[in-house]
Amino acid sequence: MSQAGKPLYLVANWKSHKTLAEAEHFVTEGSTPTENVTQIICPPVPYLASISQLIKSQQLSVSLGVQDVSPYPFGAYTGAVAVDMVKEWVTYAIIGHSERRRYFHESDQEVANKVSRALEAGITPILCVDEPYLESQIGTLDEGLRGTCLFAYEPVSAIGSGHPDTPEHAEAVAQRVQAQVRAEVVVLYGGSVTAENIKSFTDQPHIAGALVGGASLDPQSWHALIKAVAE
Ligand code: PGA
């Protein structure tokens, strides 16, 4: 079922890709302004200041996000990027991506602490969750804070594999997230989203957009994604 003009979020997760020159080139290609789509680009941390500057100077309708934050405040935490270091540039933070959970061994509690830090700094978390741990991943979050997050259902088997989940199953998971958090909470789908398949997900009544990895890297392919869902 499609709902014309429903507000959507499209999140570009660039992961550890791109040189600074490539990141800047992407932004200078411009944006496709749309009524109903909030575009959020999440570059690597060292590029945030420069990309933020470019977005401002070109007056692009694009928001910035960070791909991760430290669970700690300013302090003696070597290598950590505290939320207060990036809050001047970003509105959103991807938190708990399965690659963070897998390669950096992040626990649900650590993820929950990151969510708290982000919200304290006025940054909206985009919290990644997956089956079969959905309930405990959400359950670890402070009950009062859950409702202010955006959620991204990201099945591990679909990430970077070219094998997306079915829109019907993603829709069922989105409904489970909303049943546990609150009915209006924003739920995105992520995992092998392309310009060809994105609409089959955003046409689902409880899916409000997509978190995109591979297909967000090339400006043409990013613009094709936006065009596919723009009203
Ligand atoms: P993918 O990645 O679009 O390349 O599958 C999605 C993600 O990891 O967020």
Image: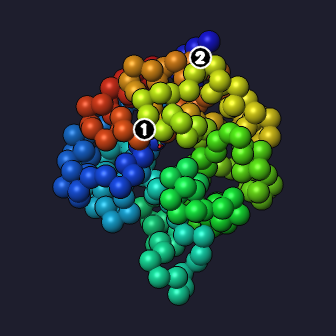
Q: Position of residue 61 (x, y in %)?
A: 38, 42
> In percent of the image, x 71 and y 40: which residue is there?
132
Q: Is residue 204 left or right of residue 184?
A: left
Tell me: residue 207, above or below residue 27.
Answer: above
Residue type beneath disc 1: Gly
Q: Position of residue 197 (x, y in %)?
A: 45, 20
Q: Position of residue 153 (x, y in %)?
A: 61, 38
Q: Secondary structure at mark 1?
A: loop
Q: Label 2 belongs to which residue? A: 3
Spatial separation of the CA atoms under disc 1 and disc 2: 28 Å
Residue type beneath disc 2: Gln
Q: Residue furthest top?
A: 1
> In percent of the image, x 68 and y 39: which residue is there?
131
Is residue 206 at least partly visible in the picture? Answer: yes
Given residues 38 and 94, the one toward you in this image is: 94
Q: Label 1 belongs to which residue? A: 160
**Location of residue 101 by image quarter:** bottom right
For mark 1, does the 10 Å Cα neighbourhood hold few (<14), some (14 to 19), or many (20 or more) residues?
some
Q: Residue furthest bottom?
A: 76
Tell me: residue 150, above or below residue 46.
Answer: above
Instruction: Tell me the quadrant of the picture where the N terminus can be found.
Output: top right
Q: Quadrant of ligand 1?
A: top left
Tell me: residue 36, above or below residue 180.
Answer: above
Instruction: Tell me the quadrant of the picture where the C terminus can be found.
Output: top left
Queried on whether the Cβ of the residue with tag 1 lies below 8 angstroms from ligand 1, the answer reads yes
Q: Secondary structure at mark 2?
A: loop
